[in-house]
Amino acid sequence: MYDVVVIGSGPGGYVAAIRSSQLGLKTACIEKESDTESKSQLGGTCLNKGCIPSKSLLDSSQEYIEARKKLSSHGIKINKPELDLPKMMERKNDIVSQLTSGVSGLFKANKVDSIFGVAKVKKANTIEVTHNGKLEIVEAEHIIIATGSSPVDIPVASINQEHIVDSSGALEFDTVPNKLGIVGAGIIGLELGSVWARLGSEVTIIEVMEEFLPKADKRIARDVLRTLKAQGLNICLDSEVIEASSDSEGVKIRYKHEDDSIDIQVDKLIVAAGRKPNTLDIIEKDCDLLIDENGFISVNDRCETSVKNIYAIGDVVRGPMLAHKASEEGIMVAENIAGKETDLNYQLIPSVIYIHPEVAWVGKSEEELKKEKADFKSGTFPFAANGRALTSGESTGFVKVIADKETDEILGVHVFGPSAADLVQQAVIAMKFGSTAKELGNTVFSHPTVSEALHEAALAVNKEAIHIANRKNKAD
């Protein structure tokens, strides 16, 4: 019998398994057999079909657009760059292979057993695993469910992975579509749209919601929308796909906007309308595990389920579907199983959109604080006034720091601009230790760096910024 068995080897599962073994617990991790690959791969969706391959294409496509449009401003003259898409895809696949084999190596180094097959929780201590038609029973004192999520399919645009594809299929195109349609203007839709627009596609994104990036700071959302449109993305808000049919010519789409019905023809359609938890058929019905109407497993703040010694983490439970959230939940659960008292501050989980420039935020937004009728103050600083951003030609966007009006404690940080993900991570560290805007403003930042924009925004909260006029800061 194992002390811990983890079901799923994504960022939540493999981290939970490694940490459990580090703490002296006999551990195994079960990974579902691949439907398409000749060999099952560890790492889950993130490493194989999500975060990592998409970031590889985002970086490669940005390099391509830089070569085409920006190098000349640096005094560098080159012949017209040519796109080698197969080479770009080969690079992506090599990175994925390196990282997935890395997880296998980490399992071996940490003495975590890998089990491949389809798992089903029968009861609190028993898992049934089916592999190549053979049934195996695996027993464990503690079970961690980390089976992740999968793309939502919509009836009006049924995915066939040929002309109508999901987010995974969108990472495998062998040619650049002349015209590309995307359902959904969320993080996945915007990132994939950015990749293919940079490589030459005419991109139309159809979003059913009226508000763009509703969870982001309103000013940032407004600026991002304007920037993406300038980059060639046609983003249609308050629009709903009512019909999509494919043939050898591509995909015919009909969508509704207000009272109008609009028809367009595209070569490929990406359905990026959200993700759903992978909880179907992994738990025996009489196991008494509580699952809500949307398929999420009910857990408390420590990811304990309704059944003693069964835990669930990552995309199968409440909260944002983010790899880093899943990883930290995995560590928390492993440490609590081992007898350590570990919690996770869910208010300090950063969100990132890897478009260009990047978007990232952590903590509260002004809109949330207004709804709570909280007293706050804020300061902003534009990258156009940051020396390092100017030298690198990345001066779009700004940093906003929000603090409690009375205590000056930092409540939220929002960034649109160069290295936004890294700047917000600096803010997460400051907020973790209860920093005030004044304390962050009194911290020494190296010069010249884009991080100085965070420094100046913190100073601006109390009208002490050096490199901008310290006018009264008003909420946008």
Image (spheres, helix red, strand yellow):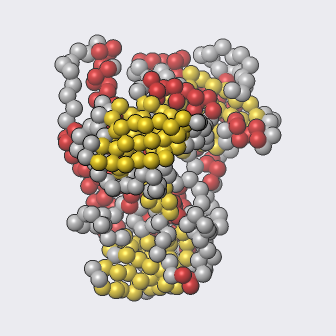
On the image, the x and y values in percent for residue 388 come to 45, 21
* Nearer-the-camera pick, 13 or 448: 13
The quadrant of the image that shows the N terminus is: bottom left
In this view of the protein, which residue sits in the foreground, 76 or 189?
Answer: 189
Q: Residue at x 54, y 17 (%)?
A: 385
Residue 212 pos. (x, y %)? 57, 36
170, above or below 135, in the image: above
Query: x and y percent of residue 121 in the render?
Result: 48, 80
- Which residue is depicted at the point 41% across and 47% down? 244
Q: Is residue 392 left or right of residue 218?
A: left
Residue 335 seen in the figure: no
In this view, 24 is above or below 233: below
Say whether residue 129 is left or right of residue 132.
right
**Residue 116 versus residue 416 in the image, above or below:** below
Q: Which of 11 and 447 lies nearest the eye of the viewer?
A: 11
- What residue sits 40% from the left and 65% below the top? 9
Residue displayed at 67% across by 42% down:
364
User: Foreground: 17 or 191?
Assistant: 191
